[in-house]
Amino acid sequence: MNIAELSIQKKTVTLVICFCIVLGGLLSYSGLGRLEDPEFTVKNAVIITPYPGATPLEVAEEVTDKIETAIQQMPQLDYVESTSKASASIVTVTIKDMYDKHTLPQVWDELRRKVGDVQSELPPGTLPSIVNDSFGDVYGILLAVTAEGYPYDDLKEYMKFLRKELLLVDGVAKIELWGLQDEAVFVEISRSRIARLGIGLDSIYSALKEQNLVVDAGAVKVGPEYIRINPTGTFDSVEDIANLQVRDPASDRGIYLKDVADVKRGYVTPPSRTLHYNGLPAISIGISGVPGGNVVNMGEAVKVRLAELEGQRPLGMEIGVVNFQSDDVSQAVNGFVVNFVQAVIIVVVVLLLFMGLRSGLLIGTVLALTVLATLIIMKTMGINLERISLGALVIALGMLVDNAIVITEGMLIRIEAGMDRLKAAKEVVAQNAMPLFGATVIAVLAFAAIGVSQDSTGEFCRSLFQVMLISLMISWIIGITITPLFCTMFIKGKEKGQDEPEKDPYQGIIFTAYKAFLKACIKRRWITMAVMVVLLFLAVTGFGMLKNSFFPESTRPQFMVNYWLPAGTDIRQTTEDIAKIEQYLLKDERVESTASYIGAGATRFMLTFGPETSMDKGYGLILVSVKDYKVIDEMIDEYMARLKEEFPNAQPILERFKLGPSSGAVEVRFSGPDAKVLRQLSNQVQDILMDNPDTYAVRDDWRQRVKIIRPQFDETRARQAGISRTDLARALEMNVSGSRIGIYRDGDELIPIIARQPEEERLDVENIQSLQIWSPTTRKTVPVSQVVSEFTTEWEDSMIYRRDRKMTITTKCENEPGVLASTIFDDVREKIEAVELPPGYEMEWGGEFENSTRAKSNLAGSMPITFLIMVLIVIMLFNCLRQPLIIWLTVPLAIIGVTLGLLVFDLPFDFMALLGFLSLVGMLIKGAIVLIDQINIELASGKDPYTAVVDSAVSRMRPVCMAAITTVLGMIPLLPDVFFKAMAVTIMSGLSFATILTLIVVPVLYVIFYKIPAKG
């Protein structure tokens, strides 16, 4: 008893299972997680180490190098990059691809230990390193709150209230506020009042620093109790600070701080970063969901809570949306589902037209069961509904009916010939179960390379393999169990008399025409193969003309304006420029809203968005939301020209968002020991890139050198005056921007106390030489000219980049809209690689080329194993070598249809097209296996070889053509989707030609290999 016979005899059990599949599939669909794009793990952590007062070179040598050395001991490390800038070290760690979201937490723990161990080796004055291992967290809901007419304090308090309330929403994991201004208590000490009262600055500093420290006062036993002692005296208000008594130990005089200083609470100027929403100052709130949570449900819960809190929102404070991931996900998933339903309808209509009403509805029902069963397994495995998984279902549709078509076709012929239904089921399943299983496994293995790839691209596309594996294997199981049952229930056999001759099922005009054409090709077998070889040669030649790409650009109705002013620019100048650009944009009717992040990169609000990490005050990002994504290209062209004209000192970069993991267009890295030589090499490459008409925003990541004012400290005279270099630096800082000298505790906030001169006494470049320095030794002020011989202006690198502890400069450019990065790369590659490198220097490519090459090499690394398994399966199916060889010889010919399709549609051979080609190989082999297996069956029945080949091809024509037609037409809904378009065209054009290969080339190769002579 085979499995088909069992499923028919246990009819009730089989039908109950069908009912359970329908019910479970519908419930699973409602419970599946939903995302716009699939998740992939960002394997980066950022370590920030402040080193106040240090130059970029001092930071690199004294801090960055030690941290990098410690990190490089980690075996999990892929590479480490660092940015050393004035007063801060930023080290970015990238972990090897083999570590995923489950193993990374252990890696980050080890990273923290390494960084913690090295703290004792850092120089005095270095603040503790901050390890940010949540750099890849996505805050999918990004809101901006404006408060026109309100004091900033009110906006800040409302944002803190919102954060507290929204953290309680089910599904919310973390909330980040961006754009909060740094608050401080300013002690503005008047030089004239200090001089008049004879109080030393060191006495004031000491009193402020010590007064508010948290110090353990011990505990005392009182009877049976042990009671902690906690003295009063800490600052409870700004007035307490003003009323602080300061006693000078030299003069033994005591005064109140307010006698020599004005104490007030305010915000640090200039701010470290600012946010505008629609041109108004704002604070943004980013909301991140719990891992594995339902983004749509979380978004709806946030909306409900915001509606409940609406009554507590002050009138005039407005909440704007920068990004609301749940809405995007719902829209995207609904769009994908519509595409899927359209594809199902197309497939079913094709089945009805070609298979008849009963057979068409039967196979359509089997298809629905297969999809619903797939949803159940997806829910069990935690696979979300997103762009890739839903696209995989559409791609799989045509392949899911293959097994059902073969079984139904076989049973239909036998039942119409008068065979008993049960016997027909047993015979068809017995003949086809193993060949269909082998063919299905091969079709799955065609996607296996992306399933086992461990880089971010493989992780991004992994659900493609998972869904294909689940759905195709389920289609085989249902094909040999439920399909035979439905065939016995619904296919009607024709009654025929005892003497009625058996009717040929393949006597239709299409079958007859195909049979005649096949016989002609077999008769002229060498001409047929010669034609194929010529077409293959032309296709390979044409394939070299195809454009290359990695991932396409998104259709998201939003684009970015990355605005760069020269290094060293004051953030207030950047803010002023950004404000002007905002006004241009807000007057444009095509623009919905703008959100501007100035002085630092924005919160990561989508996985494929990489925030800027340089913390450059000359940087600003404007997120421009438009009403229709179709206008983005023309807006980029228009505003690019306008910004270049009106802001000649700036470097604006306008770009769409990308689909999938991506980076800059063209990048090249030079590494070596001398910064000056690296800049020279970068300049040579920049000249080459600027000569290309399709590039803009040519630059390097070291940015421009910046000016510094350098007081020339006279050590001898300073010692005589009792002044140290630290005293000079502290005096300059206090008189220019202010010195941090203590902490004021206000609830849950720690607010710095900053000592500075009153505004009228504060220094600028013009009067810096009138600075007075307090000498703790002589207890009086000393003119700066007594300890500084002169003030000079010098140039230094604003930042020093290193990669794997080698100084590295990256030169890069952007591609003009409509121009592929690969086109520019091909044009400049030879010229850049011809740049002569001095000894000790090296060059390597980055950007899209590096990412694409890495993704394809990871894919290629696993392909040999999967293809070897595919070959072995084919050999095991036929237990010979010639028949598998026939099948594999047809595979290279598939490139003919692929090349033709991509050239006609003018599409690049991108990463998704590569995956489409791999899937095409599986489809082609699957069809060839079914055909050759049928030839073996015909031969076993006693037919002569020639007749067996021809009859097998004719009998397999309908299943093979049906599988191709359903797959090709089922791809039509994917054509408008820019992400899947190249893949869809690859499969559609390749499979159309592959069908010809299966029905013509396979029989011709068979008669050639087995030396079967033609008849007639």
Image (cartoon, rainbow, N blue to C red):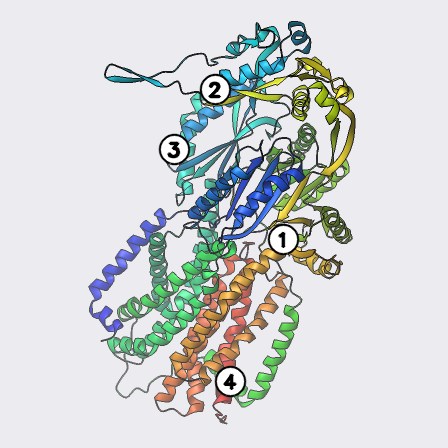
Circle 1 sits on which residue? Answer: 847
Q: Secondary structure at mark 4?
A: helix
Between 781 and 593, the one lying in front of the other is 781
The amino acid marked with disc number 3 is Val
Q: Position of residue 662 (x, y in %)?
A: 58, 51
Give the distance between the C-alpha atoms of the residues marked 3 and 4, in whole angstroms: 66 Å
Check if mark 4's residue and mark 1's residue have beta carbons within 8 Å: no
- Residue ID at (75%, 61%): 834
- Residue ID at (55%, 50%): 659
The amino acid marked with disc number 4 is Leu
Q: Position of residue 430 (x, y in %)?
A: 30, 78
Between 239 and 250, the one lying in front of the other is 250
Label disc, if present, on residue 169 of the rendered structure? 3
Give the distance between the C-alpha atoms of the residues marked 1 and 2, in whole angstroms: 50 Å
Q: Does residue 918 sit above or below 423 in this rendering?
A: above
The amino acid marked with disc number 2 is Leu
Residue 553 lies left or right of residue 823; in this view the side is: left
Q: Secondary structure at mark 3?
A: loop
Q: Secondary structure at mark 2?
A: loop
Give the distance between the C-alpha atoms of the residues marked 2 and 4, in whole angstroms: 89 Å
Q: Is residue 609 visible?
A: no
Circle 4 sits on which residue? Answer: 1005
Label disc, if present, on residue 213 of the rendered structure? 2
